[in-house]
Image (cartoon, rainbow, N blue to C red):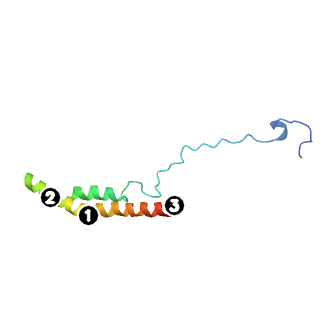
Amino acid sequence: MPPPRGKNLSRKETGAMKKKKVSRDDWDDGRVIAPMNGDELPFYRRIFASKRTEKKAKVEVTKAERRAMRKAMFAVMLPRLLLIVAGFGITALLIFLWLH
């Protein structure tokens, strides 16, 4: 039988039960849906693969050889750098002409 309207009744009088508090102490049962150890990341693969290979012997290089290697590196990289700078310059020029 529903309680009469307009009357404030206590829980005992209405027969309502107290809400049960749910304790979730054991919600983590240790199962893994997806492994999160980082093996799928490329830099981890390189780190672990490098440990498996044999270490290479250190090569001794003279100052003249080192200087020649740097000169060769800049000779290869300079044209690429100039192309990138020229591309930015042409883009800036086109934007300038378009907006004026």
In terms of sequence position, does the residue under pointer 3 or pointer 2 come before the other?
2
Q: Nearer the viewer, residue 5 or 37?
A: 37
Residue 63: percent from left, percent from top: 8, 51
Q: Which residue is mark 3?
A: 99
Q: Which residue is mark 1?
A: 79
What residue is shown at x 14% (from left), y 58% (from top)? Answer: 69
- Badges 1 and 3: C-beta atoms under 8 Å apart? no
Q: Amino acid at mark 3?
A: Leu
Q: Amino acid at mark 1?
A: Pro
Residue 6: percent from left, percent from top: 92, 38
For label 1, count other residues whose C-alpha is less than 10 Å away and answer few (under 14), some (14-19) or many (20+).
few
What residue is shown at x 50% (from left), y 64% (from top)? Answer: 98
What residue is shown at x 32% (from left), y 56% (from top)? Answer: 44
Q: Which residue is mark 2?
A: 69
Mark 3, secondary structure of its residue = helix
* Foreground label between 1 and 3: 3
